[in-house]
Image (tube, helix red, strand yellow):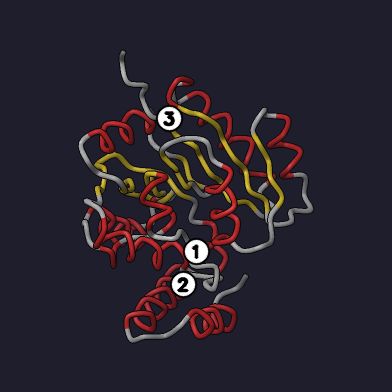
Amino acid sequence: MKKKSPQISIIIPTLNEAVNIAPLLTYLQENSSVKNIREILVIDGGSTDGTMKIAFDFGTIPLPSEKGRAKQMNLGAGKAKGEILYFLHADTLPPKDFDVFILEAVSKGHEAGCFRMKFDTANRFLSFFSWFSRINHKICRGGDQSLFVTKGLFKNTKGFNEDYLVYEDSEFIGRLYPKARFRVLPQRVVTSARKYRKNGTVKLQYHFGIIHLKNSLGAGPEELYDYYKRKIAM
């Protein structure tokens, strides 16, 4: 009997993403194969702009959650029925046929991985930093690159640490690296530079760099979040 191919559960944490969620869901439907996608879970942290209704109207599974991406993504992972979890931000578009690339990587023994990244802007400063997303080192990782991980590995690594209100993606990926053959796929996601436009490109990148440095020097989740609140607009 032929072994059933694994399927992907797409998990999208949201908070007031009415502007982005419809284009994203349309894009996902048009650029992947139905047989590879088990479900799309929109995990909402308390939106007041109609995000949940839009997600429901698209036929996805919107689920209410406590605010906080780590909590939202853990909830989605717990509800997911697919063998592979794909965590995707609402303002990020994966490459066409992303599902095929993920399944191919997993079939070759890569239990976790991401795509390279580029921003939706021609800004040279951001293009320079996005170039580093091709390097397979945990310091070059971030949630905007999206993340795929098998459900088994997710459970074995205990998922996202909910103490982290920021930096949750990087912290979790840092724990994945020693346990998996992490794969950086050559195709690129396109992610919004909206936070850079709001806060200032150089200023924001500097503060992100300081957060990385603080983490490497042993700062805990409360210290990182305190710095984020003080230096970066919410």
Residue at horizontal 38 percent and vertical 29 percent from the top: 6
Q: Quadrant of residue 162?
A: bottom right
Residue 104 placement (x, y as % from top left): 27, 31
Q: Residues within 10 Å of mark 1 (few under 14, many from 20)?
A: some
Circles 1 and 2, Cβ within 8 Å, touching? The answer is yes
- Determine the secondary structure under disc 3: loop
Sooner in the amino-acid sequence: mark 3 or mark 1: 3
Sooner in the amino-acid sequence: mark 1 or mark 2: 1
Which quadrant does the C terminus fall into? bottom right
Circles 3 and 1, Cβ within 8 Å, touching? The answer is no
In the picture, the disc for residue 154 is: none
Q: In 3D space, how far apart are the residues under numbered discs 1 and 2 (Cα atoms)? A: 6 Å
Residue 181 placement (x, y as % from top left): 21, 51
Sooner in the amino-acid sequence: mark 3 or mark 2: 3
Question: Would you name the residue on which mark 3 appears?
Answer: 7
- Determine the secondary structure under disc 1: helix
Q: Amino acid at mark 1?
A: Tyr
Q: Residues within 10 Å of mark 2 (few under 14, many from 20)?
A: some
In the displayed structure, 133 sits above or below 213; it is above
Q: Amino acid at mark 3?
A: Gln
Residue at horizontal 67 percent and vertical 62 percent from the top: 67
Q: In 3D space, how far apart are the residues under numbered discs 3 and 1 (Cα atoms)? A: 34 Å
Q: Amino acid at mark 2?
A: Leu
**Discs 3/2, front:** 3
In the displayed structure, 2 sits above or below 23; it is above
Q: Nearer the viewer, residue 203 or 45?
A: 45
Question: Would you name the residue on which mark 1 appears?
Answer: 196
In the drawing, does residue 64 fall left or right of residue 69? Answer: right
